[in-house]
Amino acid sequence: MPTKDSATKDSARLAVRKTYKLFIGGAFPRSESGRSYVVTDAKGQFVANASQASRKDARDAVLAARGAVAKWSGATAYNRGQILYRVAEMLEGRREQFVAELRAFGVSATAATLEVDAAIDRWVWYAGWSDKVAQVVGGANPVAGPFFNISAPEPTGVVALVAPREPALLGLVSVVAPAIVTGNTVVVIASEPRPTPAITLAEVLATSDLPGGVVNILTGSPAEIAPWLASHSDVNGLDLAGIEDAQLATDLEIAAADTLKRLVRPAAVDWTADPGLSRMTPFLETKTVWHPKSFEGAKGTAY
Amino acid sequence: MAVFEYAPAPESRAIVNLKPSYGLFIDGEFVEGTETFKSISPASEEVLAEVANATEADVDRAVAAARRAYEKVWGPMSGAERAKYLFRIARLIQERSRELAVLESLDNGKPIRESRDVDLPLVAAHFFYYAGWADKLDHAGYGPNPKPHGVAGQIIPWNFPLLMLAWKIAPALAAGNTVVLKPAETTPLTALLFAEICQQADLPPGVVNIVTGAGATGAALVNHPDVDKVAFTGSTEVGRIIAKAVAGTKKKVTLELGGKAANIVFEDAAIDQAVEGIVNGIFFNQGHVCCAGSRLLVQESVADEVLESLKRRMATLRLGDPLDKNTDIGAINSAEQLARIKELTAAGSQEGAEVWSPPCELPARGFWFAPTIFTGVSQAHRIAREEIFGPVLSVLTFRTPAEAIEKANNTPYGLSAGIWTEKGSRILAVADQLRAGVVWANTFNKFDPTSPFGGYKESGYGREGGRHGLEAYLAH
Amino acid sequence: MTVTAPATDQVTGSNATLRAFLHGLPGVDKVGADARAAALGTRSIKTSSKVFAIDLAISMVDLTTLEGADTPGKVRALATKALRPDPLDPSCPAAAAVCVYPSMVADVREIVAGSTVKIASVATAFPAGQASLRVKIDDVRDAVAAGADEIDMVINRGSFLAGRYLEVFEEIVAVKEACGDARLKVIMETGELVTYDNVRRASWLSMLAGADFIKTSTGKISPAATPPVTLIMLEAVRDFLATTGRKVGVKPAGGIRTSKDAIKYLVLVNETAGDGWLDPHWFRFGASSLLNDLLLQRNKMKTGHYSGPDYVTLD
């Protein structure tokens, strides 16, 4: 994304800069607080102004996420997979834009390309999980009695995520995709120092048939916003991937305990590695359904 | 016409050989504690035994023993050998099941019919089930070669003392952890008998340690820095405290907490079986069940008929001596719990709900509460929101399936739910929409070691039972 | 369960309305019904309650012989046994009835006339019921004329299973009319109806048609009486009373051979229909060998030691 003046130096034309806003309920509002903050590259050069989300933006995002739960969790797994794959397609089409946005932070061309490719591939990988995870983590249980008994995973509900500071795009995708593929809706706080790819990703999501409110992206300070999400009674899960301050992580865990949120603690993660099920299962509930199974005059099974 | 009175049919106490006092079970031995408390029979208030009250230092010794056993014996042992110890324990439980059932009923107050026919068979089955996992963990779906956490600190409630012990200890040991378990202060005795069974099984010292005590003992266990994994079953209130206590540590936690389950009866239900399900849902174990069907949601078009049948059925419930083989409803576990039930039911009456109990004579000594239903309850009443944990049912009505689901889910809890209808498509769709970890359709309060159990929302996290139950005890 | 009181003539006006009513009865979940019956089977009936239950059970026995080889001598012996099950103990109650084929009714009558023991006779082309209505009615009339107090009829299971409920209904109505003052027990042959839903529907059908008793089985088909089937019938009579105000009796028959089994049935009665049915007028056991086991257990309760088959009479 050529936002720097230098990018237009040789051109006679003055570039049209992009305004980076929040992504809530499928719309792109500014922070209700009217605040923004300066995003700079590694050398301190101006990259963009980002919206600085407030607690009220977080509240609105949770409301939007809650409103989207019924439709998204009620969609067929096949449909969710199609939409996640559509996200990958749209991302692929805007590869260069994401590479440029990452490079604006001083990421090398090679590294930026690798990260964008990995992010696209991750969407594809998770898209394929939509209709398989239930078969892998659920199944029939051979109870000792005349009952049919089956355990199946279900989404936890609304999950708040703090994306890793770096890698800004791959990290974000790596926390959002596993949470939503199973039917959760999310409020994610993007990398505070590198928020621009997150908002560009929002543009991708907004044009990928993803229902509004399934992913809500806030930019700003996790230290300011995350406590409101951690203590919000209508948030069911919390992924602290991007919290590097141990005391803050502890405080957030304590706040989350009030409503017994499902919690993923911060940990050293290689975001390029195969994630396995590790980021899907924490935000899945196992529901087990029993029903009697019998008929009069039954003489055992037919085999 | 005649009156068929059932003569007393008490199960003999002689099978239980209670000692006057019990120490703590640490490192394979019973060791004396510095402080003691008394465990009483809630049916008679008779003192059954004196039990050690584990201090922080005692807990520290127990954790150290568990750590040594983990590092030197249980951790390095092959899964196949661990399995054989667990099978051995399962067999010993079967062999001594009557003794354990009688002691459970004495210490807890639950009817012998339940401890004998429900608790004990499930306890043995649980050890059998997890025994078989010990050498098959590679196939459990948690990656190749999954590892145990180390030392598990486990705290269990008083409603199913031995069954909750089995739910905690069996998967922990199968996965290769060692444990320090704290039974509830009002029901420590069967855990101590289980310690004897561990000795009979020649289980290596330190693999299982039992520390008796109250909240302070539990807190010492949760906060002990050398505990890797905390597993708790009990109230949501204490669950929160534990979740906060482990914040910022590397301790893994699973919590099985409270519930306020909706038992939904549709107009096309098999009414006689639904009534049995309602009775089983709320009066099983005196309603001291986290997954109890404590809110009856009945479709308005059949509400009068269902209530009439329910009341007639409730009049046949036999309350009294837990050791009598014909007792359906035993004693409330403690004076404290009885006070809480009384407080909440008083609130129910005060808030305008209509209370009903069948004619029911309560014994003079001990803690008792008659089976009770409240009708005319709305979602705004305390008795529809708070877990009473007693034989008290709140009855609400609904008009449509959507309204039933909305009311059922309108609670911070999410442990269990019941559905009664003869319509298959409705069962499946309603089950899908209920936010609860266990849904019983046309049945209620069924348990099996292969079947995962645990809640949504503030009913806790993690699952016990089945393949899912291993996850809590494996690092993966 | 309370079923809205049916205006009988409307319900039974046509096969369609009768079917709509019967199929509108609440379903029965088999697993739940089995579990309830099994749970009641774990009641521990000891000491004084066992003494009470054994005597009650004896007083409820329809002492039965329904063999091709039945002779006057055989049924007279049986009738004598029904009068004085334990010849050495006058405190032992008499059986409820003697149940025989119509041709044997007169022989039984000679023995039990003037006593409390009733004469029951199977009729209506027992046990298959495969005869014309005319023949069945004649069968009933013969039995009644010979002195039967009670008629045990079989329903046409083929018609029932084919959904021709009105046919079954009308046959019961006709037989009931032929019974005159005799009480009518309707045998549903639950072992051939198989499903619990059918048992419930057949129970209601029989009661609507005028049955004084609903009875499980002929004894010629296995399974005969079972606790869950009896449970469902007890629920039906309980609900029928609540709905119509008319009380109907229940008779499990066949396969009940031990005192322990009989006591389980009495518990079922006590905790399902209620103690209003704990009376030979409202509950019977159709049995033959059961009586001697009850007598053996009665002796054990009386003497404190186990008795043996040589100490009860064989007839």
Image (cartoon, coloured by chain):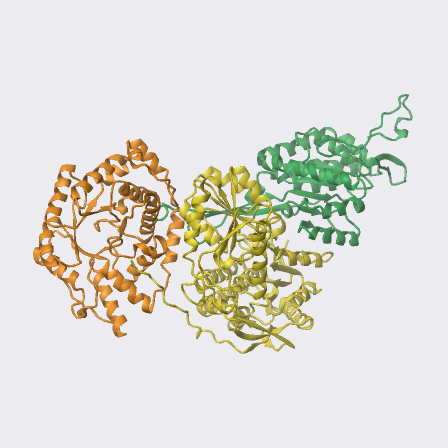
Chain colours: A green, B yellow, C orange
Task: Report the number of discs.
Answer: 0
Q: In which quarter of the image is the N terminus of chain B?
A: bottom left
The residue drawn where x is 43% and y is 48% is B308
Left or right? Give the position of C249 relative to C119.
Answer: right
Q: Nearer the viewer, residue A142 or B443?
A: B443
Based on the displayed image, in which of its 4 quarters is residue A169 positioned? Answer: top right
**Percent from the top left, x then y, of residue A263?**
68, 50
Q: In this view, does B199 lie above or below A141?
A: below
Left or right? Give the position of B403 relative to C166.
Answer: right
Q: Is residue B461 above or below residue C17?
A: below
**Percent from the top left, x then y, of residue B230?**
64, 60
- Residue C124 visible, this orientation: no
Q: Which of C138 and C35 is in front in this view?
A: C138
**Percent from the top left, x then y, of residue B53?**
63, 72
The residue drawn where x is 28% and y is 32% is C13
- Residue B162 visible, this orientation: yes
**Percent from the top left, x then y, of residue A146?**
42, 50
Left or right? Give the position of A124 relative to B138.
Answer: right
Left or right? Give the position of A244 relative to B441.
Answer: right
The residue drawn where x is 16% and y is 41% is C178
Q: Nearer the viewer, residue A135 or C44?
A: C44
Based on the displayed image, in which of its 4 quarters is residue B20 positioned? Answer: bottom right
